[in-house]
Image (spheres, rainbow, N blue to C red):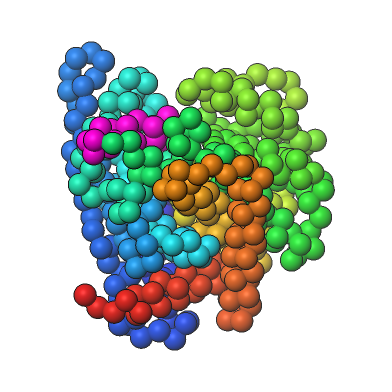
């Protein structure tokens, strides 16, 4: 990882470049360079051995110009305020790119969730929800899953909030299990949008998806689902990895089997997956495998100035948030690699979160086909908005996406005027 890398400062620089390309005055975008609210909390947890541990938690509400704050909660040992601030900005931009009526926010707890028992994880979640209670709500700020959090965590979070508010409030979080107000299609939504965006970009550049070689970094809900869907589209997924390393097969991996194996037990990794039809590779080797499509779907900073020169792909579709830093981005552009940026490619998650929230607020239930169709329409429209903006400005898709987003947020702020 590049030293002195500050994800928040980096994203602000890109945002400012987009604003300048749009011809905006500083007054039009200056508010976007400051989160509206940053909250740091202590998260005390009674551990299984009876002792009390205190973790650090954060929630950043970046922009409420276009609607309630929206964004996930991550549990990771590297979570800090700068990371959460950067991810909150990304959420504002993401919601604006796909044109759903939300602002952006993000939260997290600095904890290695893999070291906690399920009961400790539940107590941590309830403690965190209690700390955030004064600043969240179905019309204020609506969390969702992110790295190392899932439907189960969201159900605990909703229950803690509902207990405090005195009534069941499903609309306070999205990404819940179906049985407690979750939406059909939400769990697969991010992987589905990555697949949709891969299809769109493949059409534009004339790449046949049938037989196209794909490598996916990350085998969680985002990477694993994208790999599965892309295989269904006829792609050959030759490599996939997780925190424990990767696996490779020249003739294509059996993704369905691998994902089923990983999902049957919490904390399972690819290192435990047995078989003779693949070889083991490192995460770095995965990133430099010769493919048509590379999908970084793990954490930030996967494609840095050191990694980018070794990348051998035509297309990168960003499943993670912020997987490419600015130096990595510059090198990919120089090499002619097309990058479908995170704020567009992985937006399917928050789009179906939006559908879940609408259903919660109206006590409705939509069927899965309806949801998938709505998702596809919205994503394809967003892709075209970004493609056209990039083409018009003669710039990358990332810059095109930032321009679309910044323009929408700045325009909303302008209409609303100053407080
Ligand atoms: N954590 C996901 C993201 O980064 C989903 C956020 C949401 O659904 O609010 O987009």
Task: Identify the image quadrant of the C terminus.
Answer: bottom left
Question: Observer-nearest residue: 280 or 185?
Answer: 185
Q: Residue furthest front?
A: 363
Asked whether the viewer can see residue 151, the reply is no
What residue span does the magenta drawing correspond to?
A: 149-166
- Residue 251 vertical placement versus 199 (above, below): above
| Helix, strand or loop for the magenta stretch, by majority | helix
**Relative depth, front residue between 92 and 234:** 92
Residue 391 quadrant: bottom right
Relative to residue 296, is residue 121 drawn left or right? left
Q: Position of residue 273 (x, y in %)?
A: 62, 21
**Left/right of residue 388 with respect to residue 305 in the rendered view:** right
Residue 17: horizontal and vertical position, in percent?
43, 76
Residue 239 among magenta residues: no
Pick the residue in front: 280 or 407. 407
Residue 214 at x, y percent in the picture: 70, 45
Q: Is residue 158 above or below residue 306?
A: above
Residue at x-position 40% and y-position 84%:
24
Q: Residue furthest top?
A: 49
Image height check: is 62 above or below 248? below
The residue located at (47%, 82%) in the rendering is 22
């Amino acid at each position: 990882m590049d030293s002195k890398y500050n994800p928040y400062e980096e994203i602000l620089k890109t945002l400012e470049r987009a604003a300048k390309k749009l011809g905006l005055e500083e007054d039009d975008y200056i508010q976007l360079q400051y989160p509206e609210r940053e909250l740091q909390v202590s998260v005390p947890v009674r551990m299984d051995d009876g002792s009390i541990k205190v973790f650090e938690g954060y929630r950043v509400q970046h922009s409420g110009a276009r609607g309630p704050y929206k964004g996930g909660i991550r549990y990771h040992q590297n979570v800090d305020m700068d990371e959460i601030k950067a991810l909150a900005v990304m959420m504002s931009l993401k919601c604006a790119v796909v044109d759903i009526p939300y602002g952006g926010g993000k939260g997290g707890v600095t904890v290695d969730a893999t070291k906690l028992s399920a009961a400790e994880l539940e107590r941590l979640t309830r403690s965190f929800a209690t700390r955030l209670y004064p600043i969240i709500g179905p019309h204020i700020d609506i969390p969702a899953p992110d790295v190392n959090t899932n439907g189960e965590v969201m159900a605990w979070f909703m229950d803690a909030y509902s207990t405090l508010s005195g009534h069941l409030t499903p609309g306070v979080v999205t990404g819940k299990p179906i049985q407690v107000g979750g939406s059909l299609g939400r769990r697969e939504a991010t992987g589905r949008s990555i697949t949709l965006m891969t299809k769109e970009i493949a059409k534009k550049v004339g790449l046949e998806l049938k037989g196209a070689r794909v490598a996916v970094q990350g085998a969680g809900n985002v990477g694993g689902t994208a790999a599965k869907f892309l295989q269904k589209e006829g792609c050959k997924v030759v490599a996939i990895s997780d925190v424990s390393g990767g696996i490779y097969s020249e003739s294509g991996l059996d993704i369905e089997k691998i994902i089923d194996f990983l999902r049957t037990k919490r904390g399972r990794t690819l290192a435990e997956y047995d078989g003779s039809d693949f070889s083991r590779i490192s995460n770095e080797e995965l990133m430099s495998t010769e493919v048509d499509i590379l999908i970084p779907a793990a954490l930030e900073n996967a494609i840095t100035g050191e990694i980018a020169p070794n990348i051998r792909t035509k297309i990168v579709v960003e499943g993670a948030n912020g997987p490419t830093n600015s130096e990595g981005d510059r090198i990919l552009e120089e090499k002619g690699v097309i990058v479908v940026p995170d704020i567009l490619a992985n937006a399917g998650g928050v789009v179906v979160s939006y559908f879940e929230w609408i259903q919660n607020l109206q006590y409705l239930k939509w069927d899965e086909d309806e949801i998938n169709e709505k998702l596809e329409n919205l994503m394809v429209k967003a892709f075209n908005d970004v493609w056209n903006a990039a083409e018009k400005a003669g710039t990358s898709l990332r810059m095109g996406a930032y321009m679309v987003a910044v323009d929408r947020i700045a325009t909303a702020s302008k209409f609303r005027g100053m407080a």
